[in-house]
């Protein structure tokens, strides 16, 4: 195991990413982007939005000279070929997209994405120099039975621990407890901090402290303007992956601005 030199390691950044899921047609996407442009201001955090595939290019064009990055919600692991309905890393890159969300719990639950499949997608994204927001998190039953840490550890290990440490320059982690997604339930700030510290320790045990400290770990699951500041003020929480509240420009920027007041 090689240990890194500090100059090769990124500093971790604060990130707020809006996952629009399967919401907003073209006109609605354009309207929400125009609202976002009215709200945008200098922020401590990197800001990203993930519209649907059909609207990625127009979103990218509309936000080209702003500090809002347009990212994809998913991609296939193959470069091209007979995979009806899928989109490759190269296709995303050809329209300017540099970051992709992988492993969202809805992809795992409704589209059968396994840790093994996600490992292949991770490899494909990295091979194409894309940045990844890698999502994982336990279900309610895991939390109730006290297995939440082992579930999360296994998800991370199976999809990411075959990587060289340098890959972590291009990986953002997003801890999203499934029971908190779209439910209005959030992990308490203490639960979030406890899990994020556990995730960082899991990374440190494998790749060393320096790598572990360089990786941004986002929290996702019912983050709203009212709870963002409390969640983001935890030392190991570096931002949020926002679903429902990202569909309203004012709410989304209230969450982004929660960093500016910390
Ligand atoms: P939510 O979704 O904020 O609506 O809970 C978060 C997510 O799924 O990324």
Image: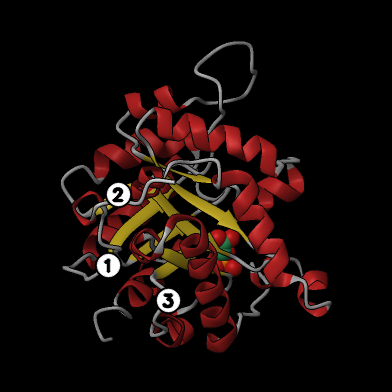
Q: What colour scheme has been applied to the protein in the rendered image?
A: secondary structure
- Percent coordinates x, y for residue 125 in the rendering: 45, 33
Q: Give how far apart the Cα atoms at labels 3 and 2 are.
A: 23 Å
Which label is found at residue 45? 1
Which label is found at residue 69? 2
User: As rendered, which of 86 and 244 lies closer to the eye?
Assistant: 86
Q: Marks 3 and 1: CB-CB under 8 Å?
A: no
Say which residue appears at 38% left-offset and 71% top-offset: 238
Mark 3: give few (<14), some (14-19) or many (20+) Cα within 10 Å: many
Image quarter of the C terminus: bottom left
Comparing labels 2 and 1, the label whose residue is closer to the camera? 1
**Residue that numbered label 3 is attached to:** 236
| Of callouts 2 and 1, the N-terminal one | 1
User: As rendered, which of 212 and 57 lies closer to the eye?
Assistant: 212
- Percent coordinates x, y for residue 237 in the rendering: 43, 75
| Of callouts 3 and 2, the N-terminal one | 2
């Amino acid at each position: 195991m090689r240990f890194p030199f500090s100059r090769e390691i990124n500093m971790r950044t604060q990130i707020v990413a809006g996952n629009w899921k399967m919401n907003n047609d073209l006109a609605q996407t354009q309207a929400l982007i125009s609202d976002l442009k009215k709200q945008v201001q200098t922020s401590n955090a990197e800001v990203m939005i993930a519209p649907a595939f059909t609207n990625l290019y127009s979103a990218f064009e509309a936000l080209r000279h702003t500090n809002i990055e347009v990212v994809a919600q998913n991609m296939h692991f193959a470069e091209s070929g007979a995979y009806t309905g899928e989109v490759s890393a190269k296709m995303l890159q050809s329209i300017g997209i540099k970051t992709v969300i992988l492993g969202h719990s809805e992809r795992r639950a409704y589209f059968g994405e396994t840790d093994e499949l996600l490992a292949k997608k991770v490899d494909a994204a990295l091979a194409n120099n894309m940045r990844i927001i890698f999502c994982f998190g336990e279900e309610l039953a895991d939390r109730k039975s006290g297995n939440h840490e082992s579930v999360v550890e296994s998800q991370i290990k199976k999809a990411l621990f075959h990587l060289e440490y340098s890959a972590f320059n291009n990986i953002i982690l997003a801890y999203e407890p499934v029971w908190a997604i779209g439910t209005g339930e959030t992990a308490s700030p203490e639960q979030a901090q406890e899990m994020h510290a556990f995730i960082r320790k899991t990374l440190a045990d494998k790749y060393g402290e320096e790598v572990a400290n360089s990786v941004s770990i986002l929290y996702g699951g019912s983050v709203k303007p009212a709870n963002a500041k409390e969640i983001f003020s935890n030392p190991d929480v570096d931002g949020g992956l926002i679903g429902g509240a990202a569909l309203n420009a004012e709410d989304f920027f209230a969450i982004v601005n929660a960093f500016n007041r910390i």
